[in-house]
Image (tube, rainbow, N blue to C red):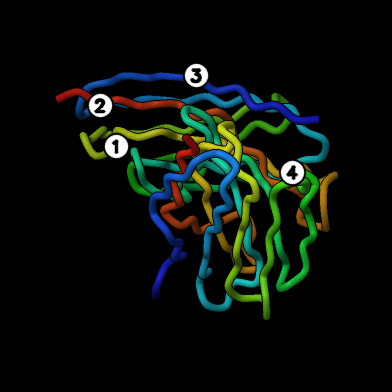
Amino acid sequence: EAGVVQSPRYKIIEKKQPVAFWCNPISGHNTLYWYRQNLGQGPELLIRYENEEAVDDSQLPKDRFSAERLKGVDSTLKIQPAELGDSAVYLCASSFYGNNEKLFFGSGTQLSVL
Amino acid sequence: GQSLEQPSEVTAVEGAIVQINCTYQTSGFYGLSWYQQHDGGAPTFLSYNALDGLEETGRFSSFLSRSDSYGYLLLQELQMKDSASYFCAVRDTSRGSTLGRLYFGRGTQLTVWP
């Protein structure tokens, strides 16, 4: 069984540039999460989807961040424009609705904003 | 609101036993989860406790006391490969849909020496 796939693995951009991250969850998992993890910290939720509906996006900085999950499968997280403080690892995770305590994480995208 | 407290670092030698504690405060409570994350890797689910008591999975065990808002992860017969960060996580049932939001602690860095 393929795991959660994220790309790119690394991204270096200058501040004020746009950036996008892509996630393909495990097949059959209807819940998808985007987390941000700063160095030495635990993951913090940005947005959670149940199928194609964003059910928890209160921690997503909507002035610069946007996300979509078309057809309830793949998802894209975008930052425009990026700021220095956005440097972090962006993790995507998925879970099956019947077992939402067990999240499967991708390896993340490490973003560096210069 | 919610908060999770766990030690920032723990060190031990191969073959030893180590316990990583986690205390939490949250609005509503489903259970306590534990995740392992190696440097540069994806967080990986280890265990979940919804009821008081000890759950054992191979060399790892997890304990929960709901009345004390406390849990721990016990790692036995430590191996070098157990060197990683360990995160406790709780779900806040007051947020989002019926699933609530999963909050992670700051993580405990375990170093296993030969």
> Label 2 amino acid?
Val
Q: Distance between the residues labelled 1 and 3?
A: 16 Å
- Badge 4 crowding class, 10 Å Cα cut-off, few under 14, some 14 to 19, many 20 or more, is few
Q: Mark 1 points at which residue?
A: B82
Subunit bearing disc 1:
B
Q: Mark 4 points at which residue?
A: A61
Q: Do the residues labelled 1 and 3 touch (CB within 8 Å)?
A: no
Q: Which residue is drawn at 51% across and 70% down?
A: A24
Percent of width and height locating residue A72 = 67, 76
Q: Where is residue B72 in the image (x, y as percent from the top left)?
A: 52, 30
Type of residue at label 3? Pro
Q: Is residue A99 left or right of residue A57?
A: left
Quadrant housing the N terminus of chain A: bottom left
* Circles 2 and 4 on the same subunit: no
Residue at 29% of width from left, 33% of height from top? B83
- Could you give the CA–CA distance between mark 3 and mark 2, rounded to whole angstroms? 16 Å
Judging depth in this view, the residue of B49 and A110 nearest the camera is A110
Residues at marks 3 and 2 on the same chain: yes
Q: Which of marks 3 and 4 is in front?
A: 4
Q: Within 10 angstroms of label 1, few (less than 14), some, or many (20 or more) residues?
A: some
Q: Mark 3 points at which residue?
A: B7
Distance CA(mark 3)–CA(mark 4)? 30 Å
Could you tell which of marks 3 and 2 lies nearer the N-terminus? 3
- Distance from disc 4 to disc 1, alpha carbons, whole Å, reads 35 Å
